[in-house]
Image: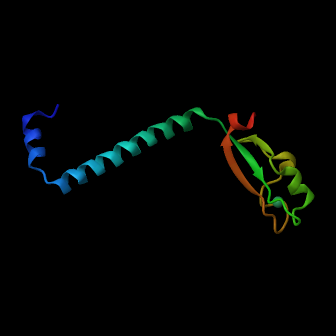
Amino acid sequence: MFGDKATRSIGRATRPTLELVATTETSSAFSAGRRYLAERLVASVTLARTWDATLDQRTCRQCAALDGATVPLRDRFPGGARPGEVHPGCRCIEGALPAFLLEL
Ligand SMILES: [Zn+2]
């Protein structure tokens, strides 16, 4: 595949050099594969927003009721509420998951 000249060059390479080349090429190929899959995934998956409240004795009723709410990515949560902005000290956060996992 690489010809006689390349084969002779490999034959003269030291073990550390060969290990360096193998390590670099393996990492590069692995990363390229992951990048390829990530790009295909992003292009093919519809994301949804999720509401995640911290559920404990300090959680207010409104935040508790919104916990687990899911809406399409560009939609608002019920009542127009925003995670982390329901009230001072709100500990809610927003997440994003593929919509097919959330049955939207
Ligand atoms: Zn909250």
Position above or below: 87 against 7: below
The residue depicted at 69 percent of the width and 34 percent of the height is 100
Give the quarter the ligand 1 occupies: bottom right
Position above or below: 41 against 64: above
Count of residue discs: 0
Quadrant location of the C terminus?
A: top right
Q: Nearer the viewer, residue 35 or 1?
A: 1
41 to the left or right of 55: left
Q: Nearer the viewer, residue 81 or 29?
A: 29
Q: Position of residue 64 (x, y in %)?
A: 87, 55
Q: Position of residue 72 (x, y in %)?
A: 73, 39
52 to the left or right of 21: right
Outermost residue on the bottom side: it is 89
Position above or below: 103 against 15: above
The residue depicted at 8 percent of the width and 49 percent of the height is 12
The residue depicted at 14 percent of the width and 54 percent of the height is 14
Quadrant location of the N terminus?
A: top left
Q: Nearer the viewer, residue 74 or 62?
A: 62
Please name the colour scheme applied to the rendered image: rainbow
Outermost residue on the front side: it is 15
Q: Position of residue 15 (x, y in %)?
A: 17, 54
